[in-house]
Amino acid sequence: MKKNTVTVLGIHDGHNSGAALISDGKVLAAINEERLNNIKNYSGTPALAIKKVFEISKIKPSEVNLVTIASFLRLDDPVKVEGNKLHFLAEYIAPLMHQKWFIKFSVALLHKFRKINEIKKVLGQLGIDQKETRFIEHHLAHAACAYYQKPWNEKTLILTLDGMGDGLSATVNIGSGFNIKRIAETSFYDSLGNNLYSEITAFLGMKRWEHEYKIMGLAPYGKADDVTDILRNVIRINPQNPLEFENISGYYLKKMQIFYQKNLAEQRFDNIAAGTQQLFEQLCLQWVKNAIKETKLHKVVCAGGSFLNVKLNKLIRELDEVEDVLFYPAAEDGGSAVGAAMEGYYGYCQKNNIPAKKVNLSDIYYGQAFTNDQIIEFFKFKRLKKFARKVSPKIIAKLLAQGKILARFSGRDEWGPRALGNRSIMADPRDVQVIRKINFAIKQRDFWMPFAPAVLEEDQKRYFKSSRFAPYMIEAFDTKQDAREIIAGLHPYDLTARPQIVNDWNPEWQTIIREFKKWTGVGGILNTSFNLHGYPLVGSLEQALWTFHRSSLDGLILGDWLIEKK
Ligand SMILES: [Fe+2]
């Protein structure tokens, strides 16, 4: 490593914990614990991930200048915390005490009791427990990962929006040079994400902080209007401060559930989803417009779990007021390890008078790869060698064109919740029957959930009304008539799609789709994450094989090798 290099380890130990290692502003490795321990959204010390980022990047622990930990308070899965003391306090005290001073005081007080013995133990095993350690506030970590990697240099409006973190649920910030200045914040009690989206998710029998995307997928089927009017009694933009949200119901958590049970009992489930999405969009768009008006900044970056809502992101992108926008692909708390490390890096440089470097966001294959030698060893160990055959992208494409559904486990893991080709299930997007097969026989998904396509950059204009480069599956697009060719990758009701636009960031993935195009004339394939329902994206060879055997996948590609079902 060069002499003046600054290397920062970022750790997030809350909901979907993980670790990241960055050097001079560039992410060298980042991985979530769930990929290593196979527990979806694992909350707790990411012991495996911390060690893994050193292994992946080949950086020695002694080269680390600073350790950063995301969030002053560790936030667990809300389902797990139900019934504990903090939950009780939040439910009964929050409606009375949600003023900013009380939140700041409580967070500062509770921070003193934050336990990091387990993190210290892992750092001790690596010999770096005595390194300088800094906590990065939750929303600052969200803001940092989006802002510092934006593809422009001008002053920028930074928006964060989530369920909650460190007592807050939304912030408005101005980014200038290597500084982030906060100008507005919304308390956790006034959370748009929690009170509206996550509580409705729970009300409809699904899991808070995990299944919100199912409400978004269901929304286009319903009629929003009546429900939206009811939900307006819960939350609005604060008339005193247009950069904040305000909970006007007087309820929180369990009492909010009672409110929904009373007021939405007569409504159809799809209409409830539609109303939720509609109000969410309306309030967010108003909030974004207000922030642009206030700051006069038209270039925007966004992070925080609420910005996984691809339909909202589409509308923000389409606002006349927005000149350019970046949605950080690991927008949810799982991305916080990178955010903490980013903020730590620029703070460290400033403090030590080291010129900081800016690195623009590009591909996000930050995880671990398995070599073909490791894969062959694995086959030998499992006595599978004679069943595996080496395959080229051409053969893979031909099998897809013949209707086979294949999983691909090759190259480095993707960062964030979306599979971008390396931990993906692939299928022919021309055939709508494929939806049924993947939903029921492979992933046990909900029947209404749409799939998404991976489309070649050169075919984007043919299928989509926008030619904006969108490599992360975090924005939805309207489609053109020709997109009927990839019908299984569109939302079946409104025919929008949230594509991965594929360029040479992942040459093998690009080649598979190009070969598929040679066979079929179609410039995209169906791409969905390689996992079973309730499990994280597959993270190991063992898990890949386990998933293959428990599903109706036709074939599994490990590195350059294919195993097929007989
Ligand atoms: Fe968050």
Image (cartoon, rainbow, N blue to C red):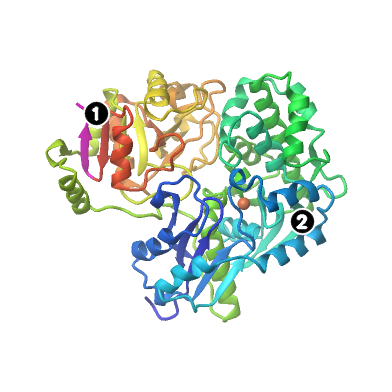
Q: Which residues are magenta?
A: 560-566
Q: Residue at x 51, y 21 (%)?
A: 492
- Mark 1 crowd level (few <14, some 14–19, many ≥20, 10 Å Cα): some
Q: As displayed, is residue 128 above or below residue 489?
A: below
Q: Is residue 521 left or right of residue 245?
A: left
Q: Nearer the viewer, residue 260 or 180?
A: 260
From mark 1 to mark 2, how far is it between C-alphas?
54 Å
Which residue has dot 1 on it? 398
Q: Residue at x 15, y 38 (%)?
A: 389
Q: Residue at x 46, y 37 (%)?
A: 534
Q: Nearer the viewer, residue 149 or 93?
A: 93
Residue type (three-letter) at the residue carrying disc 2: Ala
Q: Which image quarter is the N terminus in?
A: bottom left
In magenta stretch: residue 196: no
Task: List x then y, in percent, for residue 70.
Answer: 58, 62
Q: As displayed, is residue 36 above or below residue 421?
A: below
In magenta stretch: residue 565: yes
- Mark 2 crowd level (few <14, some 14–19, many ≥20, 10 Å Cα): some
Q: Is residue 114 left or right of residue 234?
A: left
Task: List x then y, in percent, for residue 85.
Answer: 69, 52
Q: Secondary structure at mark 2?
A: strand
Q: Secondary structure at mark 1?
A: helix
Q: Earlier in the sequence, mark 1 or mark 2?
A: 2
Ligand 1 near label 1 (Cβ, under 8 Å)?
Answer: no
Residue type (three-letter) at the residue carrying disc 1: Lys
Task: List x then y, in percent, for residue 264.
Answer: 74, 24
Count the labels in the image. Answer: 2
Q: Is residue 558 left or right of residue 99?
A: left
Which residue has dot 2 on it? 184
Task: List x then y, in percent, for residue 327.
Answer: 57, 47
